């Protein structure tokens, strides 16, 4: 891809995100989301492969439908209330339409169908942007309107997302699709606590990005797209593949690692809100995710390929791991001891 075109796309992404998260007016927020959608399309379709073109087309249609719903929601609210301010969304129909629009943009169940397909059709780098950076503006809009949203609807969608993200990821063999269903499952955890503690949703999103970025960067470094190639990729950079297991277990939420922190805080908050059955259900559903993360970790580090005479091992690369990757790996594994600072924060 032309460097100038890539620079223009990435600058537009920053611009669109900044406009959305800093705006008070619905039309400005919508404009920022539209800039984001148009900026990511060249990055999705840059390989000129039919699957990439299909992914770009699907992404455009889905995001255009969600943006139209969002604009319709804000116009309905302005018609009845006379307010275009984002925090003044109070009309019940507008709140329902906004929840639907943002759910489509994020890929929450039952509007999740587009996300795994699009992630499968793009490169790992673009997939990383789709799974992290492009979810920030819609989540910001949810945070700003959280006091007006329907808690029952959000809780239902959140539990459904956690369940489907776990179930659908079990039989996948493509790493990008597994990470897409992982993203859907984590969105369920963010949505379930949104109405009760919006700050906790933001912390969960930040920590999810922190754990997902090094996994995408590692898979991109060792050029692994399928589970079958993952079992033979350990010879390229053995140390990086070994830490991949810890990153995956952190994303699953096992206690000594960073990923345990958001799950712990969310279950604690749900129990305070007297929603113990919901907390129990979503905690049990996270075991489904743990299974496919363990499967990925098993393929990456514990499985050895058949060692027959005609088997060719991949050459160990001399390429050093980038500082950015190693920084994110360290944070995604060892951030849990800093949790008292989060508790102490006002």
Image (cartoon, rainbow, N blue to C red):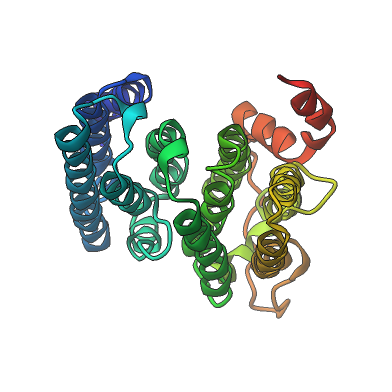
Please report the residue visible at 85 percent of the width from the left and 46 percent of the height from the top.
256
Say which quarter of the image contains residue 135.
top left
Q: Quadrant of residue 126?
A: top left
Tell me: residue 79, above or below residue 345. Answer: below
Please say if 104 is above or below 230.
Answer: above
Looking at the picture, tell me which residue is in the foreground, 195 or 219. 195
Question: Residue 192, image x and y in percent?
Answer: 56, 52
Does residue 222 show up?
A: no
On screen, residue 323 versus residue 114, left or right, reads right
Most extreme residue toward the front is 80
> Looking at the image, which is closer to me, 223 or 213?
213
Q: How far across and how far down the image is residue 208, in percent?
A: 60, 43
Residue at position x 27%, y 45% in the image: 94
Q: Is residue 41 visible?
A: yes
Is 173 on the left or on the right of 40, as rendered?
right
Q: Observer-nearest residue: 42 or 335?
A: 335
Q: Is residue 175 above or below residue 266?
A: below
**Residue occupying the point 45% across, 46% down:** 131
Q: Nearer the viewer, residue 59 or 195?
A: 195
- The percent coordinates of residue 4 (x first, y second) are 23, 24
Image quadrant occupied by the C terminus: top right
**Residue 345 drawn above or below residue 335:** above
Q: Quadrant of the N terminus?
A: top left
Q: How many numbered discs sit on the rendered protein?
A: 0
């Amino acid at each position: 891809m032309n460097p100038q075109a890539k620079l223009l796309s990435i600058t537009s992404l920053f611009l669109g995100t900044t406009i959305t998260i800093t705006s008070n007016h619905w039309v400005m927020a919508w404009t920022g989301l539209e800039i984001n959608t148009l900026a990511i399309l060249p990055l999705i379709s840059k390989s000129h492969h039919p699957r990439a073109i299909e992914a770009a087309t699907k992404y455009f249609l889905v995001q255009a439908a969600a943006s139209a719903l969002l604009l319709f929601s804000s116009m309905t609210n302005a018609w009845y209330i006379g307010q275009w301010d984002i925090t003044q969304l109070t009309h019940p129909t507008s709140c329902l339409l906004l929840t639907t629009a943002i759910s489509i943009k994020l890929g929450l169940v039952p509007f999740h169908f587009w996300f795994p397909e699009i992630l499968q059709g793009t490169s790992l780098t673009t997939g990383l942007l789709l799974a992290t950076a492009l979810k920030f503006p819609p989540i910001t809009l949810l945070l700003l309107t959280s006091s007006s949203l329907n808690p029952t609807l959000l809780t239902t969608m959140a539990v459904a997302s956690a369940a489907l993200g776990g179930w659908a990821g079990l039989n996948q063999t493509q790493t990008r699709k597994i990470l897409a269903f992982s993203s859907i499952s984590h969105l369920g955890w963010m949505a379930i606590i949104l109405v009760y503690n919006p700050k906790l949703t933001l912390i969960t999103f930040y920590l999810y990005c922190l754990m997902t970025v090094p996994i995408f960067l590692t898979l991109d470094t060792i050029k692994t797209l399928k589970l079958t190639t993952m079992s033979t990729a350990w010879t390229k950079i053995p140390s990086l593949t070994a830490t991949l297991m810890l990153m995956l277990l952190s994303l699953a939420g096992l206690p000594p690692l960073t990923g345990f922190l958001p799950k712990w805080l969310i279950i604690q908050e749900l129990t305070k809100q007297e929603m113990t059955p919901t907390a129990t259900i979503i905690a049990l559903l996270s075991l489904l995710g743990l299974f496919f993360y363990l499967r990925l970790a098993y393929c990456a580090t514990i499985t050895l390929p058949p060692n027959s005479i005609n088997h060719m091992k991949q050459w160990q690369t001399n390429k050093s791991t980038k500082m950015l990757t190693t920084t994110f790996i360290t944070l995604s594994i060892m951030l849990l001891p800093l949790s008292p600072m989060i508790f102490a924060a006002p």
